[in-house]
Image: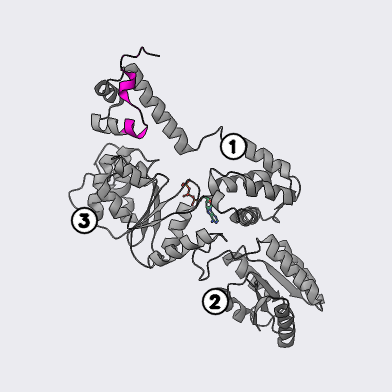
Amino acid sequence: MSKRVLLIDDDKDLLKLVSMRLKSDGFDVASADGGRKGLAMLDSFQPQVVVTDLRMDDIDGMAVFEYVKANRPSLPVIMLTAHGSIPHALEATRRGAFAYLTKPFDSAELISEINSALQAHGDTDEESSDGFCARIVTRSPLMKEVLAQARMVARSDTSVLIQSESGTGKELLARSIHDASERADKPFLAINCSAVPESLLESELFGHSKGAFTGATKNHDGLFQAAYGGTLFLDEVGDMPLGFQAKLLRVLQEREVRPVGSTTSVPIDVRIISATHFDLEKEVEEQNFRKDLYYRLNVVQLTLPPLRERRDDIPLLANHFLREQAQSKGQNPKRFSAEALEILVSAAWPGNVRQLQNIVEQTTVLSSTQVIPAQLVQNALKMDSGEIPSFAEARDNFEREYLAELLNITQGNVSKASNLAKRNRTEFYRLLHRHHLDPSEYRGRRQA
Ligand SMILES: Nc1ncnc2c1ncn2[C@@H]1O[C@H](COP(=O)(O)OP(=O)(O)OP(=O)(O)O)[C@@H](O)[C@H]1O
C-alpha cells in the first residue's frame, strides 16, 4: 500500500514538482496550497506524514505543526524552510517536529526524511480510516475488525459488552465508542465493579438521599443520574455480586433509579457499556452471573485480541508511549535500539498493552541515553515477569485460599463455613464452585 504524504506549500510550482517526484517514488500524495486547506485535508486524506512549508500567508507551518501535535500527536511533520527562518524550524523540531529541510532541497533528501519518519512512527496508519478511535494505536487486521464493529455500534444506543483480557484496552475502546456516539457531548462515567464493596455499590450507582444511612449528610446523585444523556462504563461487571445484579437489572428494565433512602424514582437515560476479563457465558452457566442481566448487557459483544496475537502493534505502541511520555515531560522522545525492539516484540505480555506501557515508562526513566538499550528492556521484563500477580489474580488467589482454609477449619461443613464467612449457603456454594473446591474432600480431614 502506498504511504500517504500530505504536502502543504503556498508555492504552487514547488508543490507540483515535489508532488510529481514523490508520486514517481510510489507515494500517495495530496497537496494543499495553504495551511488552512492542508488542515482541512487531514480527516479526509488521513496522511501518514505531513510535509509543510514554514512561511505561508493564511496559516503558517508552525500553526500547522501545533495543530497536528495537539490533534494527531503521532503524525510526523517535516518542515520546509527558507534560509531566513531556520531558527523557527529548529524551534519546531525542538518541540517535536520530525525534521526540517532548508530550501532549495534535493528531492532524494526529502524522500529519505519521509522514509525515516515513516519508520520511526511505526510505518503505518495509526487510525482507522474515518478517524474513529483516534487514540487507539494499531495496525492489526484483527483489531481493525473490532474497531469497524465498534464504529458501527457507536451510532446506535445498543448495550455493548467488551470481553477481553486485562490491559487490552477495554476502557479505551468504551470511551472511543462514547466519543463516536451521539452522546459524545454528555458525560462518560466509569465504575470498577470489583473495586467497590457491595455495601457501597448501590449508593455509588443509584445515589442516596440525606439521612439514608450514617454519614449520608446530604443528597447524593449516583452515577446513573450523573451520566444522564451519556454513557456509563461498568468495568469488571463479572465481579458484581449476585444480589446486586438483580437490582441493576430492574433499573435497566424500568429505566429509572430510586436512590437509597428515597421514596421516589428518577428517570435515567444512559447507554451501558460493560467489560469483563471473565468468560461471562461460563459464569452464567455456573450460576455466578444472572442470565437475564447477561442478555441485557450483551446485546453486542466485542473482543479485543491480546497483545501476543497482534505483535505487529508492539513497535507501534512502544513508539507511541515513548512519544506520549516525552510530550508530558517536554522532552525529545527516546527510542529503543533495534535489539531492544526485538525483545519487546517477542515478549509474552500477559498484562497486554498496560504492561507494555509500564515497561516503556520504566525503561525511559532508567535509560541515561537517548537510545534505550536491550539490557534495560530485558531487566525490566524480568522484574515484571510474574512474581507480582495482577490485582485480579491476587484477589482470586486470596479468595481460593480463604475458602479452602474455612473448609479446612470446618472439615468440609458448608453451613459452618458459610456462617464464618457471613455468606448464605447458596452463595457460598457458588463461590466454592467458582474456585473448584469440593467440600467432601475436606470431610474427615485433620486440620492442617
Ligand atoms: N491500542 C491502544 N493504543 C493506545 N493506547 C492503548 C491501546 N490499548 C491500550 N492502551 C492504553 O493502555 C492502558 C490500558 O488500557 P485500558 O485501561 O483501556 O485496558 P483495560 O483492558 O480496560 O484494562 P483493565 O482490564 O486492567 O481494566 C491505558 O493507558 C490505555 O490508554
**Residue at 73% over, 62% down:** 94
Quadrant position of residue 447: top left
Q: Residue furthest front?
A: 441
Mark 3 closeness class: few <14, some 14–19, many ≥20 residues within 10 Å = few
| Earlier residue among tags 1 and 2 | 2
Residue 327 image point, x, y percent: 64, 56
Q: Is residue 440 magenta?
A: yes
Q: Is residue 419 above or below residue 1?
A: above
The kind of residue tagged 1 is Ser
Q: Which residue is mark 1?
A: 385
**Residue at 47% over, 46% down:** 165
| Earlier residue among tags 1 and 3 | 3
Q: Point out the stretch of residues depicted in magenta.
A: 431-448
Mark 2 close to ligand 1, CB under 8 Å: no
The kind of residue tagged 3 is Glu
In the structure shown, which secondary structural element does the residue marked by tag 3 occupy? helix
Q: Which mark is residue 11?
A: none
Could one spot residue 385 in this view of the protein? yes
Q: Residue furthest left?
A: 263
Q: Which residue is mark 2?
A: 44
In the structure shown, which secondary structural element does the residue marked by tag 1 occupy? loop
The kind of residue tagged 2 is Ser
Residue 372 image point, x, y percent: 72, 48
Alpha carbon separation for disc pair 1 and 3: 47 Å
Of tags 1 and 2, the one toward the viewer is 1
Alpha carbon separation for disc pair 2 and 3: 42 Å
Q: 170 or 413: which is nearer to us? A: 413
Q: 224 or 278: which is nearer to us? A: 278
Tag 2 near tag 3, CB within 8 Å: no
Could one spot residue 220 in this view of the protein? no
